[in-house]
Image (tube, grey):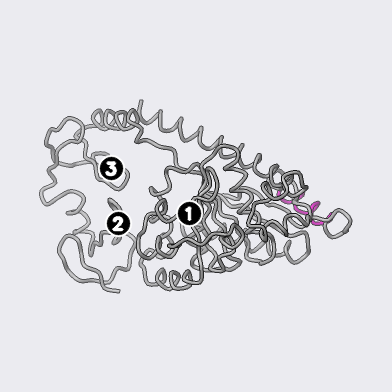
Amino acid sequence: MQSTCHVCEKSFEARFRYQVREENGQYIYICSTSCQQKLLLGEDGVHACDTCGATFEIEFPYQMSVSDGRRQYFCSTACRKRGEQRRSEVGLVRTTPKRIAVFNHKGGTGKTTTSINLAAGLAESGRRVLLIDADGQGNVGASLGIAGQRTLYHVLVNGAKAAEVAVPVREGLDVLTSNESLAAAELFLTERPNRDRIMRERLGDACRDYDVVVIDCAPALSLMNQNAMVYADSVVVPVACDYLSLVGVKQVLRTIRNVRELLQHDVQLLGVLPTFFDVRNRISREAILTMREHFEGRCYDPIRINTKLREAPSAKQTIFEYAPKSHGAEDYMRLVQRVTAVAATGQRAQKRAALSVAS
């Protein structure tokens, strides 16, 4: 696909990631490293310091930074520290939301049920949550009785703002829906030079007002799921308590490793969630023992087989609304508490890092 260089206006085909940048919500295309240098430094390399206003010639990498899609220039390390301190004081240094992909290659493991009830439980605990349906079947919207006028397709392809497209469905819970048009969005991704990072680029700063983002992934090894994994910082893997699901976990772990090594994104396994647990069945008990032995503290308490969990989508409700005293609600609340503890730890670490930079 042909693009036009932002600097020299030459027509070219982008082949490398450095040739595509996002600034101020728009994509900028750069045909070569020389044009990239001109874009960042200017023709003569002379800029005004964003802190003190003095003009200077860029000599060192620390003298330029990109924050919230805007380039900033600093004549000295002292000015850079003062600029970052000022941004912190006016609230521009914000912690990024916890981004959780609910993912398994195998179907029928309870991914959508887990995504919905995890997101709803986090919202009930006082967090602002965005639930993203990254599965073209659109089961999240069907389960909650919503159909957005615009969907994840419009965010990925048209650059629509996620906060404007998402549908508020409960207090503290917004949903970014999907439908069959997501297949067309995946075709769009294949033509992009940074095709595995479009979701991260589109949703990055647009989701800063949320505390947690939960992504319901399709049961497939697809480019859309690659985008979800590169955007997410952690993964919850629902695993049905049967033999084939246990075998499928190995493929999920390989995918996480490939994202780290090949796509250079440090996504972590947050936990493995046993689902459809029936204490009466030997295979369920053996599956739990196997997962606890292999994953230790990252094996969550199981979600028991519960009729109320199956009935809740027909009532367009979460399990906490449909049957708040059921085993399903109890089990998912335990999951919410585990994830809440991890998210709180991560956000405290981010705040400490932001304060150390500003000091």
**Mark number displayed over residue 65:** 3
Tell which of 129 and 42 is nearer to you.
Answer: 129
Query: In this view, which residue lies farthest toward the front?
Result: 315
| Residue that appears at 35% across and 60% down | 159
| Residue that appears at 78% across and 57% down | 307
Query: In this view, which residue lies farthest toward the top?
Result: 359
Mark 2 and mark 3 lie on one chain; the one further toward the N terminus is 2
Q: Which residue is mark 2?
A: 21
- Marks 3 and 1: in contact by CB < 8 Å? no
Tell which of 351 and 41 is nearer to you.
Answer: 351
Residue 198, quarter of picture: bottom left
Q: Secondary structure at mark 3?
A: strand
Q: Residues within 10 Å of mark 3 (few under 14, many from 20)?
A: some
User: Is residue 200 rendered to the left or right of residue 117?
Assistant: left
Q: In the rendered view, would you say 156 is above or below 174?
A: below
Q: Which residues are magenta?
A: 285-296
Q: Secondary structure at mark 1?
A: strand
Q: Nearer the viewer, mark 1 or mark 3?
A: 1
**Mark number displayed over residue 167:** 1
User: Is residue 45 rendered to the left or right of residue 344?
Assistant: left
Mark 1 and mark 2 lie on one chain; the one further toward the N terminus is 2
How far, Cα to Cα, is label 1 from label 2? 29 Å
| Residue that appears at 37% across and 54% down | 161
Is residue 286 highlighted in magenta? yes
Which quadrant of the figure contains the N terminus? bottom left
Amino acid carrying mark 1 in the image: Val
